[in-house]
Structures are given as structure tokens and as C-alpha cells.
Image: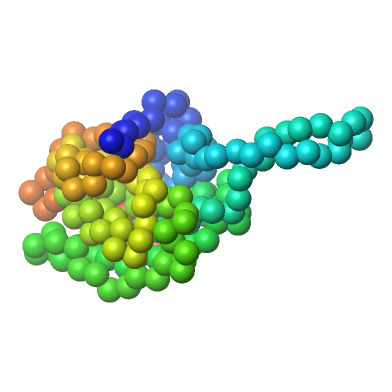
Amino acid sequence: MGKVYVFDHPLIQHKVSLMRKTDTNVKEFRELAKEVATLMGFEATRDLPLKEVEIDTPMCRTKVNMLQGEDIAIVPILRAGLGFVDGMLALVPNAKVGHVGLYRDPETHEPVEYYCKLPVDIEKRKIFVLDPMLATGGSAVAAIDFVKKRGGKDIVFMCLIAAPEGLKVLEEAHPDIDIYIASLDERLNEHAYILPGLGDAGDRLYGTK
Ligand code: PRP
Ligand code: URA
């Protein structure tokens, strides 16, 4: 059974609050997205396995812990998930990066798939699926379906803001995954946007509106 982790760290709360503000511009929004991804990633990578290796320090030979291998995949959901990639790569620079392209149909709010390219050995990797927004949950469920169909097993989902409705949908569809959320908001509005939320994450990252 996966766990749900809602961050209470003051730095994360502060940065997410800045991202919500209408007058936070594209440059600031992008920088904040990267910073929050790194802060969240620090916790989300807590369970990465270590191995003991022998090294020489200037003083003596000793045994130390190091990461077991370069066995991580980062999978942003296009397009807004891209805003989290650099922040995660700052922590795990050797991770492979896959992409899943989905957008929500503006009328039905159902996810429409247009792209999927994942590392060939995805089944061996710990996979971090990234998307700033978990609204109805449709996009996250579909992206994780993609990843599982291609063999992915050990999956974590990371988002900035989740609506309770989307969290429930995701937990029911994929009860095995861990979910990391910077802020669990109040609810969806009639257009399936999160309240209070931050608006359209893709538009805010790329200045398209
Ligand atoms: C946003 C967001 C998620 C999705 C969440 O993407 O980045 O992928 O909506 O909504 P859901 O939980 O109801 O599926 P959007 O469809 O706006 O596409 P974009 O990133 O290309 O702008
Ligand atoms: N997608 C977004 O970018 N924002 C929302 O509030 C909901 C879906």
C-alpha cells in the first residue's frame, strides 16, 4: 500500500504560497517550481537504497554508504511537469528522463494522450512521475497507466497542489504508489480547476496566457 505525504515544511509552504500569487511572474514561477521540486525530491528520495563501499579518505581507508546505482527515472507529464525536472536532476543528475504527453480536453476534462517515451529499462528503475497539478486525477492516472504498461513497477507521484477529489481517484486507481504533495487544497471548481490553486500551471510556467 502506498503512502500519501503532504509536506508541512515551512520553506515549501512559503514557496508554494508565492507561486499561487497572481503577480508572481513567469521567471519567478519557474525558479520557484525548480526550488520546490528539489525540496520535495529531497524527502521523496529518502528510501533510495544504499550500498557500503570502501574508499580512501586523506586519513585512512574506510567503509561509507553510497547510492546503489543510477537506477532512477524521472517522468514529467508534459507540459507542466517539465517545470519540476531540473529541480529533481539537481539531486540525482544521472537519472534518466522519460516523457509522457497528456493534456486535458477543455470540455470533458479527460486526459488526451499524445506522446510517451520512456527509458528502455524502465522496469528496473525507481520512477518519479512529476506534475505540478493533481486536479480530477485523470492525467496522473493515465500517465501512471502508461508507465505500468511499459513495465514500470516502483513508482512515486510528486505534485505541487492536489485537490482531494484527484487524490482519491489516484489512490483508488494506483493504490501501490507513494504520493508526495506540497499542498492539499480545498476542492475543484466547476471547470475542474483547483481552488485556491495557482491557475493553469502550464500557462504560468511558459507564459502562454
Ligand atoms: C494540467 C496539469 C496536469 C493536469 C491536471 O495540464 O499539468 O497535467 O492539468 O488535471 P487533471 O488532474 O484533471 O487531469 P494541462 O491539461 O493543462 O496540460 P498542459 O500541461 O499541456 O498545459
Ligand atoms: N490544471 C492546472 O494547471 N490547474 C488546475 O487548477 C487544474 C488543472
Q: Nearer the viewer, residue 132 or 46?
A: 46
Q: In which quarter of the image is the C terminus?
A: bottom left
Q: Is residue 5 left or right of residue 47?
A: left
Eyeballing the image, is 33 above or below 15? below
Location of residue 83 in the rendering, given as x and y in whole percent from the top left corner: 44, 55
Eyeballing the image, is 51 above or below 105? above
Residue at 31% across / 58% down in the picture?
148
Residue 60 can be seen in this image: yes
Q: In which quarter of the image is the N terminus?
A: top left
Q: In which quarter of the image is residue 139?
A: bottom left
Q: How is the image coloured?
A: rainbow
Location of residue 186 in the rendering, given as x and y in whole percent from the top left corner: 18, 34
Q: Is residue 187 left or right of residue 9?
A: left
Location of residue 195 in the rendering, given as x and y in whole percent from the top left corner: 19, 40
Q: Nearer the viewer, residue 206 or 58?
A: 58
Residue at 37% across / 57% down in the picture?
152
